[in-house]
Image (cartoon, rainbow, N blue to C red):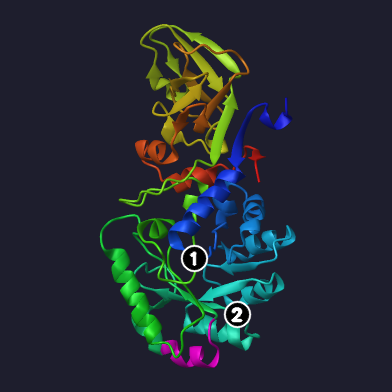
Amino acid sequence: MDSRTSRAWVEVDLDAVRRNARTIARQSGRPLIPMVKADAYGHGAVAVARALVPDNPWGFGVATVAEAGELRAAGVTGRILIFSPLLPWDFAAVREVGATPTLGAPASIDAWIATGGGPWHLAIDTGMHRAGIEWHRIGAIAEQVRRHPPEGAFTHFHSADANDGSMAVQQDRFRAALAALPGRPSVLHAENSPGVERQGPSPWDVVRPGVFLYGVGGASGSVLQPEPVAHLRARVVDLHEVPAGEGVSYGATWKAERSSRIATLPVGYADGYRRAFSSRGTVLLNGRRAPVVGRVTMDMTMVDVTDVPCALGDVATLLGRAGDDHLDINVIAEEVGLLSYELLVGLKLRVPRIYLGA
């Protein structure tokens, strides 16, 4: 047995990542900037980027200079855009790793130019109100842009997964902002994953898929379905016979209504399996579904296997696919009031990754 799979692990299907990327490329008709920030949403930025390089993405998207540096250290040589706002003292490190900043604040644009300049992308706020120059204030930076034109310009949708008309409003604002610039940047981008799901082909030059690459779709009305990528598994390490009336786990919040057989899995919220699954989650085990019982603890989770044949060492699946059954991350996250994004990024906490394919 591989020592990495003696307790708990995440299987990451890199071939599924590539197929999901190709689905997005077909839908959008545009080159991709795959978002590999937050360690590729918990899947491993280096492994994901390497898997996608053969499909010639336009570049990769990250959130921090350190994330860009990690890709460079691993031999990723293409464009890397840093999408979080940066401060002037970050610029030397940006140049050192050969990344491209995204700038919106006039002072930051001035500082980038004053410290040597280089390619940059203009962040335009069309309603997210998180970062970038407001779409109706482009005149404030017109002279800066005229003297030092950005390579690209972009905006970000706040509700692309909802059929509420906001995406169209934001795109109209983006067009108005672009029309106010002294010239058209050569690379325009707006769509995240749900944005691509909602419209195709893209009216822009490149697209920025993120969570769809990792198996999460869900834009309202979308017919695109990504393949699952991450599969969280753990072995049964203990079995208990629990009499009727006895409780399980901290606080004894779940009590057996009958004599029950309880299996312990060595995975908990320190591994990214959230406490929200306490007495609400489900695992796949030997072709059956078994409910989580009691509170999920830091290192262990208990499941009721009274009706599920199992033995020590058997493998349970807490997220993803096992055989013909599938615990869809969108579904299980919604059931416990979490975002699928939260579950994915939590998978990097402690469990080792086992890469399949690519």
Q: Quadrant of residue 94?
A: bottom right
Q: Residue at x 64, y 85 (%)?
A: 115
Q: Is residue 58 left or right of residue 262?
A: right
- Give coordinates of residue 270: x percent, y percent: 56, 37
Q: Residue at x 46, y 84 (%)?
A: 184
Q: Can residue 266 be seen? A: no
Query: Among all residues in the image, which is located at the extreme left?
Result: 164
Where does label 2 land, which residue? 119
Q: Is residue 136 left or right of residue 345?
A: left
Where does label 1 land, which residue? 30
User: Magenta segment range?
Assistant: 140-150
Circle 2: residue type: Pro
What type of secondary structure mainly makes up the magenta span? helix
Q: Is residue 202 left or right of residue 107?
A: left
Q: CA distance from mark 2 to mark 1?
A: 21 Å
Q: Is residue 149 a member of the stretch shown in magenta?
A: yes
In the structure shown, which secondary structural element does the residue marked by tag 1 occupy?
loop
Quadrant of the drawing holding the N terminus: top right
- Give coordinates of residue 107: x percent, y percent: 51, 84
Q: Is residue 2 left or right of residue 51?
A: right
Number of callouts: 2
Vertical comparison of 203 with 270: above or below: below
Q: Residues within 10 Å of mark 1 (few under 14, many from 20)?
A: many
